Image: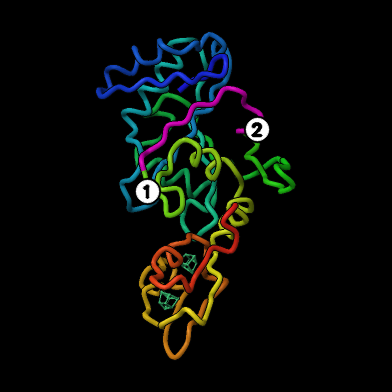
Amino acid sequence: MGKSGGVSTVVFFKEEEQLSEALTYFDLKDFKDKKTLVKLHMGEMRNRYYVKPDFVKKVVNEFKKIGSHPFLFDTTVAYNSPRKTKNGYLRVAKLHGFSEHKIGCPIIIGDKGVVQVVEGRSFEVAEEVFKTPHLVAVSHVKGHVQAGFGGAIKNFGMGGVTKESKKMIHKGCEPVYNEKNCTLCGECEKACPFHAIKVKDRWYWNTKACLGCGRCVNACPTDALKFRDADL
Ligand code: SF4
Ligand code: SF4
């Protein structure tokens, strides 16, 4: 998608072979001789939910054809995973087929940020995202408990900030418990992927284990759980 004079250009295509033609609808002259940051998720260990390297390579080749210098980029994650460190993420990326040798461009994982203040809140934007004016999002389709769909905006909004900012953004999705509405049904415990909730004689919540994914809030049938800060 591109934007010119306040109007967005949106091109739909079904076959990978149409990528080249689809890109002709955009004015990419300014990408020539510049670095292009291609933002994507290169996959969590043991899952298959990422755009496959063969297609990403095609995207990279299109930008090389116009004389740009693309590199693949993602940031380290806040939760326990090999992707929590730069080297760990690079290992997972390589396992999934994202290596400089296979894709034909550098693979960079960011871990440092530049502080930016937005509406009174400060966020650390990944240095590479901050410094590279030419950005491309390659996003896989995924559901999202609050937004319904996570795509290009999430790719940069959450994936383009540091671990500290990710934690801060997720904090807004931590549950706030209202005992009066709770029937101790245990649905929130079942929904929590990080085992942060236990429902026995009462409701227990381990704040340290909670990563603010918001699933418990969505699972609660009686509105006993609400998001701490729905605006974040
Ligand atoms: S899902 Fe809601 S009602 Fe059920 S135990 Fe959890 S907080 Fe209580
Ligand atoms: S927000 Fe996510 S991690 Fe935290 S308690 Fe709820 S389901 Fe578990």
In the rendered image, which residue does mark 1 sit on? 143
Image quadrant holding the N terminus, namely: top left
- The picture quadrant where one finds residue 221 is bottom left
The residue shown at (41%, 46%) is 92
The residue shown at (52%, 77%) is 205
The residue shown at (37%, 48%) is 143
SS assignment at label 2? helix
- Going by the numbered disc 1, the residue's amino acid type is Gly
Mark found first going from the N terminus, 2 or 1: 2
- The picture quadrant where one finds residue 96 is top left
- Going by the numbered disc 2, the residue's amino acid type is Phe
Magenta includes 140?
yes
Residue 38 percent coordinates (x, y): 49, 29
Magenta includes 139?
yes
Q: Quadrant of ligand 1?
A: bottom left
Q: Nearer the viewer, mark 2 or mark 1?
A: 1
Q: Which disc, if any, is residue 43? A: none
SS assignment at label 1? strand
Q: Nearer the viewer, residue 231 or 26?
A: 231
Residue 222 percent coordinates (x, y): 42, 73
The residue shown at (34%, 12%) is 21
Please state the extent of the stretch shown in magenta in the rendering: 129-141
Q: Nearer the viewer, residue 109 or 193?
A: 193
In the rendered image, which residue does mark 2 sit on? 130
- The picture quadrant where one finds residue 42 is top left
Q: Against 38, is 170 above or below?
A: below
Residue 149 percent coordinates (x, y): 40, 44
Residue 134 percent coordinates (x, y): 57, 22
Q: Nearer the viewer, residue 96 or 125?
A: 125
Q: Against 29, is 194 above or below?
A: below
